Amino acid sequence: MPNLEVKEQLPLSFRRLLEISLGSIVYRLLRSAVTVAIIVLAIAFLAQIMMDGFLGRAARQAAQSRADKLAAYSRFLRQVSSVDADEPLVASFAKVQPDTAAFHNLRRWGTGDTARFIALSRQAQVYREFFDAIPLGRRVLLVQHQAGLAVFDWLAQPENYQSFREQLQRMPALRLPAGLAEFLTDWPWYRQQLSAVKSAYARVIAGVGDVDDQLAKQPTEFFSHLAAIGFAVDAEVQADILRGFEHQQRVRWAFAQLKAPPVAAGWSRQFQEPFSPGAALVSCAGSPARRAWVAQTLGGLDTEKFRAVASEYRADERLQKTAQELLSRYGSANALSERVVWLIVVSFLVCVVGIANAMLMSVLERFKEIATMKCLGARRQTIAFLFVTESVIVGVIGGIVGTVLGLIIVVVRHALAYGRVTFERFPTGDLALTFMACFCCSLLLAGIAAIYPALVAAKMAPMEAMRVE
């Protein structure tokens, strides 16, 4: 009997291979749907984690910016009333930017090299946060019982710094920010400048006078007077201070209405709850019945003004609460935590195993189909490419669906939790990059997971595959 010679076919075009792969996916729709679902869950999880960070930090910045504007008056009132302790002063100096009123104030207060003073303030703040984050027991071993800026006074002594370095070497988990030795060299100069600044600051605010009275009567002349004595205020901040002052005046008026004896005395009896002016004003914002009771109890109340002030006060309280929640949850870090990274790695492993398992099952189901293609002259590269292409197509579908699903989940969750601040600084660019990264990850996962099943199919002997039932 003559030997049969099976010649290899010519390479198929990419379009034809793509058509075969799509046909295979449609034919095995249920198994393909399971594989797509695995990728969707993994990519949605990844997209949600990454997009949540970007969206949360953007919302935090928006809420913090609005909260800072609302607090401009209170902050200004505190600044011109008394000189803070050293630690809060250093923290405020660390935020000073060049060519601002605060920068020029520091220059007038005798800092000498103002840029160097601000740079050292920022370094001091970084090292303070490092030492404050260390557990008490370890901190005692490192710097004894020193706290705040006294830590740097203690470390400036050579023998103390040597002891600190020796103890630090025994704590490899602690990562000291770079440049501490150079900072300590400049510390005596900084301490001297800080003392001079505090003295000049105290002399300046001694000539400020009655802030509320001057803001109510002649705000423009008042800010000009402050600039003349060495406490200049940026024009934008002046506007925020005036808005905050006017808001505070309205709130004081509303509190005065609620503190009137008939209302304050009858509130607990009428509504069965303890009386607090702030809580009462918030509750009146959403309750026409309570506003009507207050108006009836007082008589002659400007109900429309009272309603507007109550609504404004409630919105401000919500904003402050939102800003605090976002700051507590997202802090100032921009990197993923180790715990989140491990969750992502585990989800990727599960995804790769699931895809590989689905593709292996596809190979086992198609033994005779693969053998037939080989007997007809299909090359190993063609068969391997078919399986990889089929997996990548599934990865494309799963990646798009998973990323969109993750984006929808995180945006809806943030909108429900934090309201409109979610969209004030919406990080469109960061989310677009995250979308592309998640999509590429889905392709990579699908491609990696298909390598082994594709090799198994490509190396299969035709006659052995034909015998499999």
Image: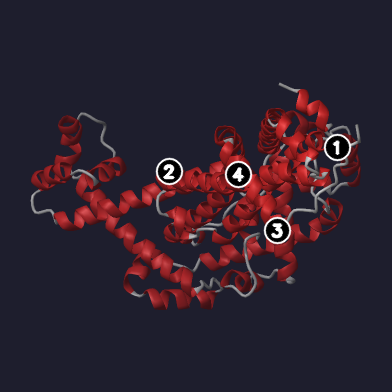
Q: Determine the image quadrant of residue 347.
A: top right
The quarter of the picture where the N terminus appears is top right
The CA distance from mark 3 to mark 2 is: 36 Å
> Secondary structure beneath disc 4?
helix
Give the residue at the far top of this rendering: 469
Quick check: marks 4 and 2 in contact, CB under 8 Å? no
Query: Which residue sits at x=18%, y=45%?
Result: 260
| Residue under numbered circle 1 | 168
- Nearest to viewer (mark 4 / mark 2): 4
Query: Which residue in the structure is indicated by mark 2?
Result: 417
Mark 1 secondary-structure assignment = helix
Tell me if label 1 and label 3 are in contact, CB under 8 Å. Answer: no
First of labels 2, 1 by sequence position:
1
Decide: few, some or many residues near mark 2? Use Cα within 10 Å; few <14, some 14-19, many ≥20: few
List the residue tagged with mark 3. 121
Question: For residue 346, which numbered disc appears in the image?
Answer: none
User: Which of pointers 4 and 1 lies earlier in the amino acid sequence?
Assistant: 4
Q: Position of residue 394 (x, y in %)?
A: 62, 43
- The quadrant holding residue 179 is bottom right
Q: Earlier in the sequence, mark 4 or mark 2?
A: 4
The alpha-carbon separation of the residues under discs 1 and 3 comes to 24 Å
The residue positioned 56% from the left and 57% from the top of the image is: 83
Amino acid type of the residue that numbered disc 2 sits on in the rendered structure = Ala
Foreground tag (4 vs 1): 4
Q: Tag 3 or tag 1, which sits nearer the N-term?
A: 3
Distance (Cα) linking label 4 and label 2: 45 Å
Residue 287 place in picture, x, y as percent: 20, 43
Residue at 68% across, 53% down: 16
